[in-house]
Image (tube, rainbow, N blue to C red):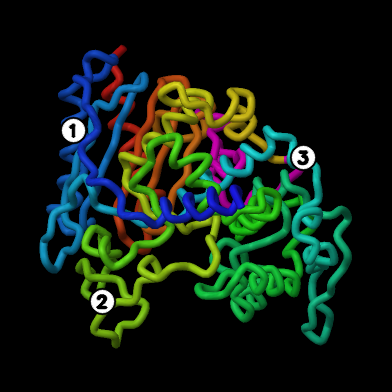
Amino acid sequence: MARCTRYLAALLLLIAVPAHAESLKVTKPERVGMSSAKLQELRDYFQKQVSDGLEPGFQVVVARRGRVVMHENMGYMDVRTREPITYDTLFRIMSLTKPVTNVAAMILYEEGRFSLDDPIAKYIPELADLTVYAGTNDAGEMILEPPRHAPTMHELMTHTAGFTYGGPYSSSPVNEIYQQLKPFEHGIGRQEAIDRLSRIPLAYQPGTEYIYSYSADILGIVVESISGSDLGAFMQERIFGPLGMDETVSWVPPELEQRLMKIHRYDEQGKLAIFSDDPDSARPLDRSLVKPAIFNGGGQLISTPGNYFRFAQMLLNGGVLDEVRILSPSTVQLMTTQRYPVGVRERYWAPGQGHGLNVSVVVDPTQINYPTSKGEFSHGGLANGYFFVDPEEELVVILQSQLFPPRYRNVHIPIVNALVHAAIVE
């Protein structure tokens, strides 16, 4: 009964109305070896993106040595109404959820609840009999073979287990089955998601390739299986509550809808418009406004940059923030260092970048054409959010917008990295 009471309390906290958000305490940049004048150039860059009609708006956090030197809003929550972004604006952080899900898993790892070498099927038995796509025959039919080894937890966390997203990250014919079965379709429950996954072949032999995938969503199910708790409630109890992340939720109830920034897109004339799943609907559909049947560990969370800064700073600090320890330094290092198995074929990341456990990691700065450091780790989100942590410079940067398709990878990352590092003067 006590465990049930704790679970319900945590769940209620997750969906409760967050407190009103305010600006983080901002320190004069010169106190942490940064230039105010150079950071103004970063502001000017974002403001120009908005004034030129290329982006609806941003909220940005820059911190060094544990102190915030920039926390500002630029632009609009809705380009139609020109309602400005404020400190309590909520953003769909999309795949920035993945590092959070991985931290949830690593909490259990530190408790000895699983090994990285464990097969995934130890915790999701329905995935014990997966087959592997091995080409097509003359009739155009799939050739399937057994896996050379069962996909492991380590492979799940590094997107090398054989799963895909059934979309642009892979050209495998297996994608068509993902698109037909939609294993994480909004509204289906945990068991239905597992049953659909069990019917989809792996796209490649486990441990031989890297393809961005539903792996973090599957990892979320593993966390639930091991912990015996709903993933959202587990995150609230073990991460959000301890870190004071009271603006982070899994869905937006009606009383918070006015705080949720609209997702924008470019219309046929190249102008910013509101993205809608149903262009014929007077009111754009938004899955973030509907309580999910299952917490998707790959992209569920809604948060603020101020809240996500606390999560990122915890990682930079080696697993601790304000004397609250979430992970040990060795576990954070395990998560944020290059984890590709030898011989893995990369299909997605740029030269010089590798992958830790659900974060991208810089392994060779000389192959990257903007300022960075070896060991910098990061992740982006489909709605144009991005964060990076540079341990060498003790730097945390959070960028949030709501634009699809996103521009952070090809546009913002090189420029923002250049401007932020140019502001470091000592």
**Quadrant hosting residue 245:** top left
Q: Is residue 419 left or right of residue 51?
A: right
- Amino acid carrying label 1: it is Glu
Q: Name the residue under label 3.
A: 115
Q: Which residue is the site of mark 2?
A: 268
Q: Residue 41 carries which label?
A: 1
Q: Residue at x 63, y 67 (%)?
A: 190
Identify the residue shown where x is 24% and y is 52%. Answer: 89
Q: Earlier in the sequence, mark 2 or mark 3?
A: 3
Between circles 2 and 3, the one closer to the viewer is 3
Specify the segment rendered in magenta.
341-365
Give the Cα distance between marks 3 and 1. Answer: 46 Å
Give x and y (percent) for residue 340: 69, 40
Identified by mark 2, the residue type is Glu
Q: Distance between the residues labelled 1 and 2?
A: 32 Å
Q: Where is residue 301 in the image (x, y as percent from the top left)?
A: 43, 54
Residue at 52% x, 24% y is 318
Judge the density around disc 2: few (<14), some (14-19), many (≥20) Cα neighbours within 10 Å: few
Identify the element where label 2 is drawn.
loop
Q: Which of marks 3 and 1 is in front?
A: 3
Chief secondary structure of the magenta portion? loop
Q: How crowded is mark 1: few (under 14 residues within 10 Å), some or many (20 or more)?
A: some
Indicate the amino acid at tag 3. Ser
